[in-house]
Image (tube, rainbow, N blue to C red):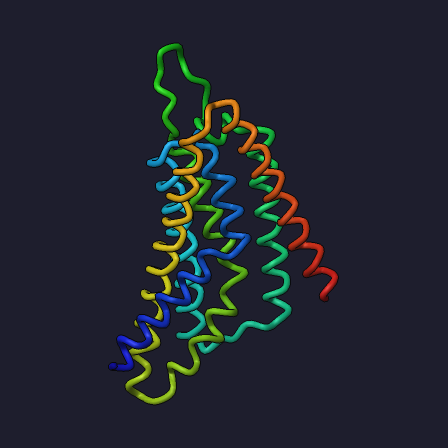
Amino acid sequence: MSPILLAFLLGLSQGLLHAVGPDHCAAMATLGTLGGGRRRAAITTAFRFALGHAAMLGGIATLCLLAGVGLSETFERWAEIFGGAVLVALAVAALLFPNTMNHGHPHLPGHAHEPHEHVHTVSTAAGALMAVSGVRSLLLALPPLLVGGSMSLAAWTYLPGFALGILLGMGAVGLLFAEGLTRLNSRLTAWVQRAVALGSGALGLFWIGSRLAGG
């Protein structure tokens, strides 16, 4: 197997594993419940979250590689604290302003209750912000691929493979979550939304507390 293909497949597998991290799943679940169990809305939300996440990760990693800049453990710790804060903010918004997060404005009688661009914008932004905590881990995976002239190109094929893995993994999580919600009635869906938001907020607080304690 050529180094380029090997690097791409390695990036793909690592991206899939990265996508199903507990913080990512919690964020996508919190945003996904706002679609009211609609498959299309949940998948779009997951895709937008993944797109923002992959773009931010790849962009920062590329800049660091080109500039020859490394990131410290201290940066990673505070970036993870920041990611936990984003998760808490999403949970609070989903609990206190679910209709605003979903629709962005009140609906007129007879207006179809389809999710609007507002929640998709939030999903993209949340994915990008939560990507900051994973940049250092991505950079640590790249140096072995930069050894030798032929491996330099392999390092650049690792990044699109990693991004594709994120998109596929998060899309699958969004689809599975939507399939589960479609089997619930509207009342149960509302309770699931609250439970998911509370769980996400608790995970975010735990994430922050554990990183602060570890410092």
Against 25, residue 141 (above or below) is below
Task: Please give left or right for residue 146 compared with residue 30 in the image.
Answer: left
Name of the residue lying farthest toward the top? 109
Against 89, residue 14 (above or below) is below
Name which residue lies at 40% across and 44% down: 176
Q: What is the x, y in percent for residue 166?
A: 39, 57
Q: What is the x, y in percent for residue 25?
A: 50, 49
Against 187, residue 179 (above or below) is below
Name of the residue lying farthest toward the front? 183
Count of numbered marks: 0
Name which residue lies at 25% across and 81% down: 1
Name which residue lies at 36% across and 47% down: 47
Residue 94 lies in quadrant: top right
Q: For the C terminus, which image quadrant?
A: bottom right
Name which residue lies at 59% across and 73% down: 72
Q: What is the x, y in percent for residue 181?
A: 44, 34
Name of the residue lying farthest toward the right? 213
Task: Please give left or right for residue 104 compared with residue 112 in the image.
Answer: right
Q: What is the x, y in percent for residue 98?
A: 53, 29
